[in-house]
Image (spheres, grey):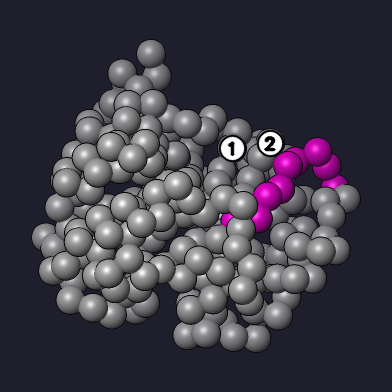
Amino acid sequence: MKIINTIEEDYHIHCLQYSDWLSSIDDIIKFWWDIWLKKIAITDHSQISLDHSWIWKKTLRQLVLNRWKNVWNNMEIIFWIEWDLLNEAWDICENIQGREGNFLMLSAHEKIYAWDPKNINKAYENAIIRHHKKINFLWHPCMKVWWDNLDIEKLVSLANEYEIPMEFNCSNFVNWKTDLVKLDVLLKKANHIYVNSDAHTLSELRDNRNIWFEFLKKNYPDLFK
């Protein structure tokens, strides 16, 4: 298995302007001296998630994408979309106000995926077969919320077949949301992974990835050879 991003890159970060975070994009950028990241992705939830909750924020995305610039330092900022798996067919929500991102990740959230959880593998399978050319990686696939309903070995095998990386989600681990048995399978079977913070606060952005990398170095040292 190979880790795609370096310790200086984080591709799963939320912000106040158009996602579920407590700090603004500029606050995150100014925090650069404490996190030493050179490249980050601000990752918004899809339109269906916005429609379910943060409705007032959905109008800010166009303003951020069209006018916002980093005036603080040389950190590279990109903006992506966290797709939502909708059902057992191949249906996903891949846009915000009809606009897709240039880097797209597929995830399943229990309040959005409202179908039979026993069919979660079939839902992933259909979505991957239909949309694999657009999917850059699968987000937090080891969440406890799916428990025994998700066959992680089968999902990893399918992702490998279509050359889709998996995600090693730091916030889920730190907040006890990760199924460690499934995580072990993912780390031993996946061809490629991203290690991302999934940060929703500045403290998570500073600490979570370091905790995860220490965990990896201690328990899976072969990843760093």
Give the side of residue 117 with respect to residue 57, left or right. left
Amino acid type at image mark 2: Lys
- Residue furthest toward the top? 225
Q: Position of residue 79 (x, y in %)?
A: 65, 55
- Residue furthest toward the right? 71
- In which quadrant of the rendered image does the N terminus lie? top left
Identify which residue is drawn at 38% across, 13% down: 225
Mark identifier at residue 9: 1
Does 215 sit above or below residue 129?
above
User: How many residues crowd around disc 1 within 10 Å: few (fewer than 14), some, or many (20 or more)?
Assistant: many
Amino acid type at image mark 1: Glu
Query: Which residues, given as a range, are shown in magenta?
Result: 72-80
Query: Is residue 48 shown in magenta?
Result: no
Does 219 sit above or below residue 128?
above
Identify which residue is drawn at 28% across, 80% down: 114
Q: Position of residue 86 (x, y in %)?
A: 35, 73
Q: Where is residue 191 in the image (x, y as percent from the top left)?
A: 32, 30
Q: Is residue 89 visible?
A: yes
